Image (spheres, rainbow, N blue to C red):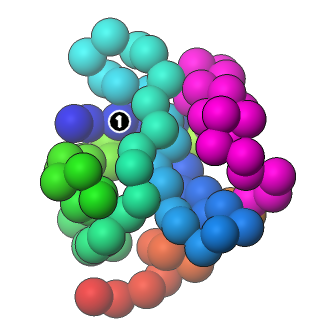
């Protein structure tokens, strides 16, 4: 799964998620919790086993924002933090 206009967001529960836009059809995308992330190649594996490839510069798509907000409501997420910069600085 390749996503553009991406961010890494951490919920108040401590789970981190890729949020962005699916490059195939430009729909919003929110991953399950990130289990592994390699900032050198911008690739991560989530709890569902899906591999996400982050494409292009980080950003914030309207489709991604909409889906993230809906996902937060459904999952009772009341706060989150953008940890993109922190995640990119981490080394595996």
Give the magenta part as a residue range: 60-80
19 vs 83, left or right, is: left
The residue furthest top is 25
Residue 14 point in image, percent of width and height:
60, 73
Q: Main secondary structure of the magenta part?
A: helix
**Can residue 51 be seen from the camera position used here?**
yes
What's the residue at 44%, 16% (across, down)? 27
**Image quadrant of residue 47?**
bottom left
35 lies above or below 53 = below
Secondary element under disc 1, as helix, strand or loop, is strand
Q: Position of residue 2 (x, y in %)?
A: 26, 36
Residue 57 vs residue 81, the one in the foreground: 81
Label 1: few (<14), some (14–19) or many (≥20) C-alpha neighbours in 10 Å: many
Look at 73% across and 46% down and name the residue there: 76
Tell me: residue 50, above or below residue 22.
Answer: below
61 is higher (above) or lower (below) than 78: above
Q: Nearer the viewer, residue 67 or 24?
A: 67
**Which residue is labeled 1 in the image?**
3
Residue 23 is situated, as x and y percent measured from the top left of the image, at 31, 23
| 52 in relation to 60, above or below | below
- The answer to whether residue 43 is visible is no
| Residue 36 image point, x, y percent | 28, 72
Q: How many discs mark residues in the rendered view?
A: 1
Q: At x 66% / y 62%, what residue is drawn?
A: 11
Q: Where the C terminus falls, by quadrant?
A: bottom left
Q: Is residue 67 magenta?
A: yes
**Quadrant location of the N terminus in the rendered image:** top left
Q: Locate residue 88 relative to residue 38 in the image: left or right.
A: right
The structure residue drawn at horizontal position 44% and vertical position 31%, both measured from the top left corner, is 29
The part of the image, by quadrant, that contains residue 74 is top right
Which of the pair 92/16 is nearer the observer? 16
Please tell me whether residue 3 belongs to the stretch shown in magenta: no
């Amino acid at each position: 799964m390749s996503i553009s206009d991406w961010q890494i967001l951490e919920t108040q529960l401590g789970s981190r998620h890729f949020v962005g836009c699916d490059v195939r059809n430009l729909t919003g995308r929110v991953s399950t919790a990130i289990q592994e992330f390699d900032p050198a190649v911008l690739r991560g594996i989530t709890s569902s086993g899906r591999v996400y490839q982050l494409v292009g510069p980080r950003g914030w798509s309207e489709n991604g924002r909409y889906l993230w907000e809906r996902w937060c409501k459904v999952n009772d997420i009341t706060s989150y933090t953008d940890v993109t910069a922190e995640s990119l600085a981490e080394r595996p």
